[in-house]
Amino acid sequence: MHIAYLTPEYPHELCPASGGLGSSIKNMAEALVEKGVQVSIILYGQEIDKHFDENGLRFYFIKQKSYQVGGWYLYRKYLQGRINRIIKKETIDLIEAPDWTGITAFMKFEVPLLIRMNGTDAYFCALENRKQKFKNRFFEREAMKNANRILAVSDFTGRKTMEVLKLNRGYEVIPNSISIEDFKPSENNPEPNRILYFGSIIRKKGVLELAEIFNEVAKQYKEAKLLLAGRDVVDIFENVSTWELFKGKLSKEAAKQFEYIGSLDYSMVRKEIEKANVVVLPSFAEALPMTWLEAMAMEKALVTSNIGWAPEVMIDGETGFTVDPRDHQLYAEKILQLLKDKNLAGNMGKAARKRVEEKFSTEVVAEKNIRFYEEVLQKWKNSSINN
């Protein structure tokens, strides 16, 4: 079986940027290769044209092209031609593509197309109460309508996406996964009273609420220290740095107990997670967040949001606490409870690791993906014989 992942991002030095989508594809691709599945990564919208083999994977970087008119359509047709040639050359059996901005709208492939819902633009606009561009909604809906099969990384994401795009299609749920060998618990004790947020510094991740929450923490606990690690993003509503907005919300006391350590290399992020006593991830908009899985796998007690997808990842009161980020007082109380009770934080961290091992490890999720791919290919084969 030969699977190709079509994606705009992947954690590789030749790819300008990569986030949760790229990380989830990398985790799964490497796990599939270990199980004897051939995998190709087809990256569109890139700065270069290049293909090569690396770590058992075949990479195809496809350069972004510019058109004077109708680029949204012409680039898709250009990609279609390139991808179909790759399919033929490499004997690819199935293409998996993301739902974001409907890149596969108007494309036809010679193998089945699977779309995995990691969160469309329509989905995130709905969660953030933002207006979506008509063309993005149109492309996403067309892509979803024309896919042979659909997956969702969480049931909430699947249901919400179908509701927002006004589609009535079935989907399977297979979550994102992480390598539990790459995210092991630290042998060193965490630094006392150290609270960590890691991820983009952006409104939808709840960081502006976190400023208000930490004001409450700092008021009650002078030893607490909050660290923010991540890339600053211009706020979509106020068109200024989100980091500046965050600073403006901090009280004088909280500002003394806070540090922004900026965007870090991934290995450095892991070191910060190791040192953290409590991890806070109060996001308003996710599909199934990789950051949550990473912190859980490293046996960290979390205080997260309680929105939508949260119960599919966290067990409130067991793997940490899930709280509405807008309830600043309650959120602060849960952080303080974990800071002051080592045994509680330790037990929750162990329960979090166990949940990841059982439900979100690449070993477990790769098997689910393989079974699903085999089912899709068998139905495709039967359909081709009958036709």
Image (tube, helix red, strand yellow):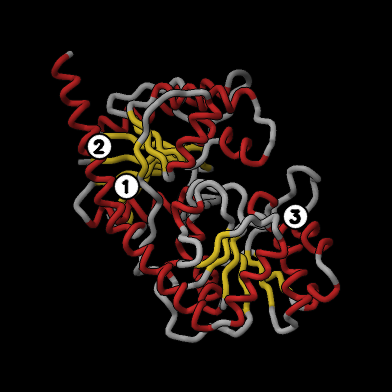
Residue 48 position in % (x across, y down): 49, 42
Find the distance from the CA under tag 3 to the CA under tag 2. Answer: 45 Å
Number of the front mark, 3 or 2 = 3
Q: Earlier in the sequence, mark 1 or mark 3?
A: 1
Label 3 close to label 2 by CB (< 8 Å) = no
Q: Residue at 35%, 45% (x, y): give it.
A: 174
Q: Nearer the viewer, residue 138 or 15?
A: 138
Q: Which mark is residue 242?
A: 3
Residue 117 position in % (x across, y down): 45, 38
Mark 2 neighbour density, 10 Å: few (under 14) some (14–19) many (20 or more): some
Helix, strand or loop at disc 3?
helix
Q: Residue at 59%, 19% (x, y): give it.
A: 70
Helix, strand or loop at disc 1?
strand
The amino acid type found where label 1 is placed reads: Arg
Is 54 on the left-hand or right-hand side of 205?
left
Q: Quadrant of the C terminus?
A: top left
Is 116 on the left-hand or right-hand side of 92?
right
The amino acid type found where label 2 is placed reads: Glu
Q: Nearer the viewer, residue 198 or 304?
A: 304
Is 49 on the left-hand or right-hand side of 387?
right
Find the distance from the CA under tag 2 to the CA under tag 1. Answer: 10 Å
Question: How many numbered circles are shown?
Answer: 3
**Residue 49 shows in this picture:** no
Q: Residue furthest top?
A: 387
Q: Earlier in the sequence, mark 2 or mark 1?
A: 1
Q: Is residue 128 above or below residue 140?
A: below
